[in-house]
C-alpha cells in the first residue's frame, strides 16, 4: 500500500475525542453519535472514493492538499452532478475536522477549492430532476387498486401510502411509526415523530391528520382498518405480511416503501421508474402548493426547517397557476 494512502475514516472514531482524557467514556460515545447514521454512511462512502482516487494518483490523503482536492473533484465532475461533487468536498472536510484539523488548516476550506467548486457549478448547473410526485389526484387514482380487496397486504399497503402522503413522511420516518406514536381523536389522527432528519436534538414533533371527506382516500380510516385487521396492540405499525397471512416480527424496511409505491403506480398504469418512496412526501408538498396552502402551512406538515426546499415544491405545484398563457388562450 502506498505510504500516502490512509483510508482511515475519522468521523466514526474521532482521534480528537479518543485522545481527550478530560472526557468520560460516556461523553465520548455520545459525542460520536451526534451525526445521523445515514449521514455517516454517506460520508464513509464518499471518503472511500476519495481514498481510492488518491491511491491511484499517489496523492496525500490525510492531511491532503487543496490541489489534491481540486484535481479529484475535476476528475469526479466528468461523470457526477455538481451536488454530488459538493457533498464529496463536505465529507473530506468533515473527516479532516474529526482528525483535528481546524478551519485554518483544513484543505477543503481553501479558497482554491471554493473557486474550483464555483467553476464546476457554473459549468454543470445545479438542477436536479427528481422523481415524480404522488399528488392528491394520484392518490385517487391509486385508490382504485384497493377496491374489492380486504386481505392484510392490501390493507397495510393502503394505510402506508395514504399515511405517507398525508403526513409528508420520509421513508425512514414512516417505517419507524409505532402504535404507541398514534392517538385517534374525533377529528382524526395525531402522530408523534420521536426523531426526524432535521431534528438532531431529538425533540420530536407532532402532526395532525384529519378525516378525509372521501372514505376511499382517508388515511385515518385506512390506518384504523389495518390496525384492527392485523390485531396490532403495540410495536411497529407496518410489518411484513407472510404468505400464510401472519405478520413478521419487526418493522418494514425503508426500501419496502419504495417497492410498495412502485408496485401500485404500475398497477395504476403509471411508469414505476418515475416514482420512489420520496414521491409521497414530495407529492404532499406539491399538492398543497397547488391548493394555495401557505409556505408555513406546508412546512408545518413536512417539518422542513428551511424554506429553500419547500419553495422548489411550490414552484412545481404552481407551474400552471396564473400562467400567462391561460389569459392568452382565452
Image: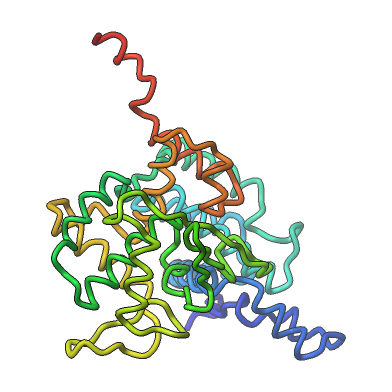
Looking at the image, the residue that sits furthest to the front is 186
The colour style of the image is rainbow
Q: Nearer the viewer, residue 23 or 190?
A: 190
Q: Give how far across and how far down residue 65 sits, in percent.
A: 62, 60
Specify the quadrant of the image occupied by residue 124.
top left
Q: Nearer the viewer, residue 306 or 73?
A: 306
**Image label count:** 0
Q: Give how far across and how far down residue 261 sits, in percent.
A: 27, 62
Quarter holding the C terminus? top left
Q: Is residue 108 left or right of residue 329?
A: right
Q: Nearer the viewer, residue 65 or 24?
A: 24
Q: Nearer the viewer, residue 37 or 251?
A: 251
Q: Give how far across and how far down residue 118 sits, in percent.
A: 54, 40
Q: Give how far across and how far down residue 49 sits, in percent.
A: 44, 68
Q: Is residue 205 left or right of residue 220?
A: right
Q: Is residue 302 left or right of residue 175?
A: right
Q: Residue at x 23, y 76 (%)?
A: 153
Q: Residue at x 47, y 40 (%)?
A: 121
Q: Residue at x 32, y 62 (%)?
A: 161
Q: Residue at x 44, y 47 (%)?
A: 82
Specify the quadrant of the image occupied by residue 248.
bottom left
Amino acid at each position: 500500500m502506498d505510504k500516502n494512502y490512509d483510508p482511515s475514516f475519522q468521523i466514526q472514531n474521532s482521534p480528537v475525542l479518543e485522545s481527550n482524557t478530560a472526557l468520560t467514556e460516556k461523553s465520548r460515545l455520545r459525542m460520536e453519535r451526534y451525526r445521523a447514521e445515514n449521514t455517516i454512511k454517506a460520508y464513509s462512502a464518499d471518503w472511500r472514493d476519495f481514498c481510492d482516487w488518491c491511491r491511484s494518483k499517489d496523492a496525500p490523503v490525510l492531511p491532503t492538499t487543496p490541489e489534491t482536492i481540486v484535481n479529484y473533484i475535476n476528475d469526479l465532475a466528468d461523470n457526477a452532478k455538481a451536488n454530488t461533487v459538493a457533498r464529496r468536498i463536505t465529507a473530506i472536510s468533515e473527516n479532516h475536522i474529526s482528525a483535528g484539523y481546524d478551519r485554518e488548516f483544513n484543505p477543503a476550506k481553501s479558497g482554491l477549492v471554493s473557486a474550483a467548486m464555483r467553476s464546476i457549478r457554473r459549468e454543470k448547473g445545479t438542477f436536479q430532476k427528481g422523481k415524480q410526485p404522488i399528488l392528491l389526484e394520484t392518490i385517487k387514482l391509486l385508490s382504485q387498486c384497493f377496491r374489492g380487496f380486504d386481505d392484510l397486504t392490501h390493507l397495510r399497503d393502503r394505510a402506508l401510502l395514504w399515511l405517507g402522503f398525508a403526513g409528508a413522511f420520509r421513508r425512514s420516518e414512516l417505517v419507524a411509526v409505532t402504535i404507541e406514536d398514534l392517538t385517534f381523536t374525533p377529528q382524526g389522527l395525531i402522530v408523534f415523530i420521536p426523531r426526524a432528519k432535521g431534528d438532531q436534538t431529538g425533540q420530536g414533533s407532532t402532526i395532525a391528520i384529519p378525516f378525509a371527506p372521501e372514505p376511499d382516500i382517508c388515511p385515518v380510516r385506512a390506518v384504523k382498518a389495518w390496525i384492527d385487521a392485523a390485531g396490532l396492540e403495540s410495536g411497529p405499525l407496518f410489518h411484513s405480511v407472510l404468505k400464510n397471512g401472519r405478520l413478521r416480527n419487526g418493522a418494514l424496511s425503508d426500501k419496502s416503501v419504495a417497492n410498495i409505491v412502485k408496485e401500485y403506480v404500475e398497477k395504476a398504469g403509471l411508469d414505476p421508474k418515475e416514482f420512489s418512496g420520496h414521491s409521497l412526501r414530495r407529492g404532499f408538498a406539491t399538492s398543497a402548493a397547488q391548493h394555495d396552502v401557505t409556505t408555513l402551512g406546508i412546512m408545518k406538515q413536512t417539518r422542513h426547517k428551511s424554506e429553500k426546499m419547500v419553495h422548489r415544491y411550490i414552484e412545481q405545484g404552481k407551474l400552471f397557476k396564473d400562467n400567462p398563457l391561460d389569459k392568452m388562450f382565452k
